[in-house]
Image: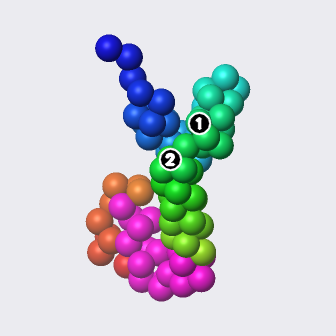
Amino acid sequence: MSESPCTKCERLLQSYLDGELNEIEAREAEVHLDDCGYCRRHYRFERAFREHVRKTLTEEPMSPELKLKLAALRSGAHPADRS
C-alpha cells in the first residue's frame, strides 16, 4: 500500500522547512501544499512556531553562568572544574 500525499507531506515537512529535500521532493511538497488546505495550515503553523522560537531565543540573552555551564557540557568538563 502506498503512502497518501498527506502522510508523505507530514513525514517530509520538517525536512522541507529545513531546506533539506532534493529538488523533486521539494517540488512535490510545494504542489501538495498548494492543493491541500489541511497540510498548508500545518506548514504555516510549523513555520510560524519556528519563527517564534527563533525570535524568542535571540531576544533573551544568556547569563554568563549559563554560558559557562553550556560550554562545560559541550567540552565534557564539569562546570565547577572551570572556576
- Neighbours of disc 2 within 10 Å: few (<14), some (14-19), many (20+): many
Look at the picture and state if 21 lies above or below 65.
above
- For label 1, the SS is helix
Q: Which residue is rendered at x = 51% and y = 66% of the image?
A: 49
Residue 54 shows in the view: no
For this view, does 64 lie left or right of residue 26?
left
Residue 15 shows in the view: yes
For the magenta stretch, what is the residue range?
56-73
Q: Amino acid at mark 2?
A: Cys
Q: Which residue is rendered at x = 43% and y = 74% of the image?
A: 68
Q: Which residue is rendered at x = 54% and y = 78% of the image?
A: 56
Where residue 62 appears, as percent x and y from the top left, is 50, 81
Which residue does the numbered mark 2 point to in the structure image? Answer: 39
Q: Which residue is rendered at x = 51% and y = 61% of the image?
A: 45
- Count the labels in the image: 2
- Neighbours of disc 1 within 10 Å: few (<14), some (14-19), many (20+): some
Mark 2 or mark 1, earlier in chain: 1
Tag 2 near tag 1, CB within 8 Å: yes
Which residue does the numbered mark 1 point to in the structure image? Answer: 32
**The C terminus lies in which quarter of the figure?**
bottom left
Residue sitting nearer the eye, 76 or 52: 52
**The N terminus lies in which quarter of the figure?**
top left
In the rendered structure, does residue 24 fall within the stretch colored magenta? no
Specify the color scheme.
Answer: rainbow
Prevailing secondary structure of the magenta residues:
helix
